[in-house]
Amino acid sequence: MKRITAICIAAMIVIAGCNSNPEKERVAKLSEKKEELQKKKDEKTKLDDKIKALEVEIAKLDTGMNKQQVTKLVSLAPIEKQTFSHYLELQGRIDAENISYITPRGMGGQVRAVYVKKGDAVNKGQLLLKLDDVIARQNLATVKQSMGAVQTQLNLAKSVYERQQNLWNQHIGTEVQLLQAKSNMESLDNQLKTIRENVKAAEEQVRLTNVYSDVAGVADEVNIHVGETFTGMPQTGIKIVNTKNLKVITDIPENYLNKVKVGAAVDILVPDVSKTIHSTISVVSQSISASSRGFIAETKIPYDALLKPNQTALVKILDYSAPSAITVPINTLQTDEKGKYVLVASKEGDKMYARKRAVQIGESYKDSVEIKGGLQAGDQLITEGFQGLFDGAQIKTTNQ
């Protein structure tokens, strides 16, 4: 019985060992260590603050220590209200307002002649290609021949009707003969009208073999040759670019949808040609791209011979501006357990001391941060030498 009990206990120990999860134990242990580390950091911060506070109190009470206290050299800058601007900095590309991929007005056909080459200046309505028109001209000739035959028949029918009318006026012949002559004339006249419309259609088919440019610009691509079939596909066709009207297209992340509006100021830098352009947003797309998770903003820019479609542009969009704001260098901003603060100089009697000033921050851009509260114009901000300073430390400036 004792042996059976021992075997059961051993089996339970083995099963418990198999059911343990080393990965869960590792994650739990890691989480515990992180919590312990954060707790120690918080305790250290509180302890440092207490040490600083005690040092200040001791310095005030111990007159011997005050004599030995080292006055730290700092630099000051007066707080002034000024315009603060925040920009979104993104990459865009230059595009042309008018880019046309030439297509045939009909079904296309075999190319017989090409009248343009890459780089040529092209006028609107200029003939670019000539397609095979043999069948179209044959159809036109056949229809015109039919029109001539019907015209001859119509002339004869009119003459017969006029004669029959004259005889009827002289009470010669029958009314049936007159009506038959009139009906024959009207039938041929209707046939002639139909054939004339067919002639117009055949002439239009001939004109469709001429391919014209629908815009003025430059032939940026000419990928078609004599003998090939022209259908208007971009890979085997003609691309006309008009650079007189240019724009910059920028893909903006969707989280800025509420910040980017039509009319927002934009600074555009084209690094390839070292040009900076000031403009405003003219178009903001109303949908989010499923692939990029962004939306498109367009900005019109003036014509410049150095600017080409698909050039890279650096785009700065003004999304926030405060005309009368207080700002400080971002490197002067410090953090304690209570939040953000800066150090300012306070004149107390004939001495100057560093004083901690809690602040509420707003937007930040480059090396400046907007201060929403805690500072006012005229305060003397410590901009250099603030490292290691504590609230109440005696300071002096280079001018003292």
Image (cartoon, helix red, strand yellow):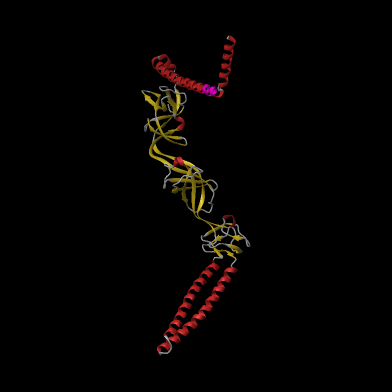
Task: Please indicate, yes or no, whether residue 397 appears anywhere in the rendered image.
Answer: no
Above or below, 324 relative to 36: below
The quadrant in which the C terminus is found is top left
Q: Residue furthest front?
A: 1
Q: Position of residue 230 (x, y in %)?
A: 59, 60
Q: Residue at x 39, y 27 (%)?
A: 357
Q: Where is residue 226 in the image (x, y as percent from the top left)?
A: 63, 62
Q: Does the magenta stretch include residue 29?
A: yes
Total numbered labels placed on residues in the image: 0
The quadrant in which the N terminus is found is top right
Q: Residue furthest top?
A: 2
Q: Where is residue 344 in the image (x, y as percent from the top left)?
A: 40, 27
Task: Please indicate, yes or no, whether residue 371 appears anywhere in the rendered image.
Answer: yes
Res 391 → quadrant:
top left
Above or below, 116 relative to 275: below
- Foreground residue among 195 and 373: 195
Res 22 → quadrant:
top right
- Foreground residue among 215 and 280: 215
- Foreground residue among 345 and 214: 214
Q: Bounds of the magenta span?
A: 24-30
Q: Does the magenta stretch include residue 224?
A: no
Q: Residue at x 53, y 78 (%)?
A: 149
Q: Which residue is drawn at 59% across and 10% down?
A: 3
Left or right: residue 245 compared with residue 235: left
Magenta stretch: dominant SS?
helix
Q: Where is residue 199 in the image (x, y as percent from the top left)?
A: 52, 72
Above or below, 58 relative to 125: above
